[in-house]
């Protein structure tokens, strides 16, 4: 177990600090960091993962929102100043486009904004060679979910569109201080082959997926009414794609959503001419 540092824990920042050093070592080992790599750590907290990252990475960029923790980390790692770029910022507001090479990302994410952080990072996906996150187990299960399961939804689709996701291990509440109410899971997120074609319309794709899941219990036929399409347009789309609209949105794979977007896109384009 590691030394206890006095710090008033801020609930609003989802501060559940890892206290099990063996778990911390194991997590970092999954990142398989090479000596010449730069690692971005989200929410370093008191530095339990950061201190291990120094052993493997060329440089650690750490983004922490809590100014008290930033001051603490500056003191704790004063000897590592050359290897640490400590940024006092809200990751959700931070523009990551300034990163100049592909890096790995690691983080024991604050539960309440875990999915928002992931959606934010998707915008900068070409910057990352891999991401390793500790999340609420329930969120991890949504990330890896397959069509036809209760966990499958827009989050599963938006992440799996660009990345392959794998749950590596579950972590019990007792590994954290204070212990959270639920289990956590460690997930590995790796970029995969681009599914969008050059001619695709990503905005329309996101819109259709969101609409398809807007009322989970409703059939696609009803949810898709939110689109500017006539009944006979929908019939045409169903015929062209072979997709049955009498099922719920959770039954469609990502490839089917892409097909749907292409077919609907053609009709919308025609009606705008
Ligand atoms: N990495 C540490 C560990 O494993 O013990 C701390 C993990 S704790 C679950 C989450 C950390 O993220 C806290 O240090 C918290 O202050 C920080 N945090 C919360 N919201 C943040 C945000 N929007 N941007 C950057 N850091 C944030």
Image: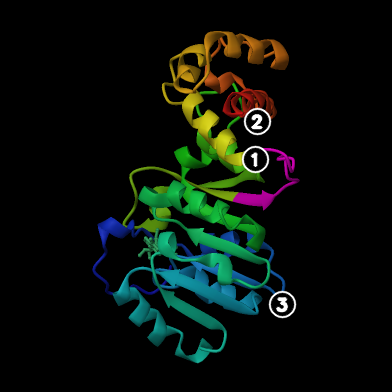
User: What span is in magenta?
Assistant: 188-200
Please say if 181 is above or below 90.
above
The secondary structure type at the circle numbered 3 is loop
| Closest to the observer, 197 or 42 | 197
Labels 2 & 1 near each other (Cβ < 8 A): yes
Which dot, 2 or 3, sits closer to the camera? 2
Please say if 229 is above or below 193.
above
Q: CA distance from mark 2 to mark 3?
A: 35 Å
Is any atom of residue 19 visible in this view? no
Could you say which quadrant of the image residue 271 lies in? top right
Could you say which quadrant of the image residue 28 lies in? bottom right
Could you say which quadrant of the image residue 130 lies in? bottom right
* Mark closest to the chain's N terminus, 3 or 1: 3
Residue 270: x and y in percent read: 64, 25
Q: Is residue 159 left or right of residue 256?
A: left
Please say if 201 is above or below 223.
below
Which label number is shown at residue 254?
A: 2
Name the main secondary structure of what is drawn in magenta. loop
The residue lying at 35 percent from left, 80 percent from top is 72
Confirm whether the magenta stretch covers residue 38: no
Q: Is residue 68 left or right of residue 234?
A: left
Q: Which residue is mark 1?
A: 161
| Closest to the observer, 88 or 166 | 88
The residue lying at 58 percent from left, 13 percent from top is 234
Q: Which quadrant: the N terminus?
A: bottom left
Figure quarter occupied by ligand 1: bottom left
* Mark closest to the chain's N terminus, 2 or 3: 3
Q: Which residue is mark 3?
A: 36
């Amino acid at each position: 177990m590691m030394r206890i540092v006095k710090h008033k824990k801020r609930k609003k920042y989802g501060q559940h600090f890892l206290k099990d050093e063996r778990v911390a070592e194991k997590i970092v080992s999954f990142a398989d960091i090479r000596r010449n790599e730069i690692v971005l750590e989200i929410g370093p907290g008191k530095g339990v993962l950061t201190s291990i990252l120094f052993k493997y990475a060329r440089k650690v960029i750490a983004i922490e929102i809590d100014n008290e923790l930033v001051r603490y980390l500056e003191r704790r790692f004063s000897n590592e100043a050359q290897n640490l770029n400590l940024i006092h910022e809200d990751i959700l507001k931070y523009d990551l486009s300034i990163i100049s090479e592909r890096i790995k990302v690691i983080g024991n994410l604050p539960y309440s904004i875990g999915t928002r952080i992931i959606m934010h990072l998707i915008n900068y996906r070409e910057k990352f060679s891999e991401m390793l996150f500790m999340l609420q187990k329930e969120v991890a299960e949504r990330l890896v979910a397959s069509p036809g399961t209760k966990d499958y939804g827009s989050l599963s689709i938006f992440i799996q569109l660009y990345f392959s996701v794998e749950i590596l291990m579950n972590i019990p509440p007792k590994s954290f201080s204070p212990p959270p109410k639920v289990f956590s899971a460690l997930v590995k997120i790796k970029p995969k082959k681009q599914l969008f074609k050059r001619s695709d319309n990503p905005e329309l794709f996101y819109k259709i997926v969101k609409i398809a899941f807007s009322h989970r219990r409703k059939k696609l036929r009803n949810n898709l009414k939110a689109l500017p399409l006539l009944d006979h347009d929908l019939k045409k789309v169903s015929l062209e794609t072979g997709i049955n609209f009498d099922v719920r949105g959770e039954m469609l794979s990502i490839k089917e959503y892409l097909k749907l977007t292409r077919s609907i896109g053609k009709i919308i384009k025609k009606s705008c001419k």
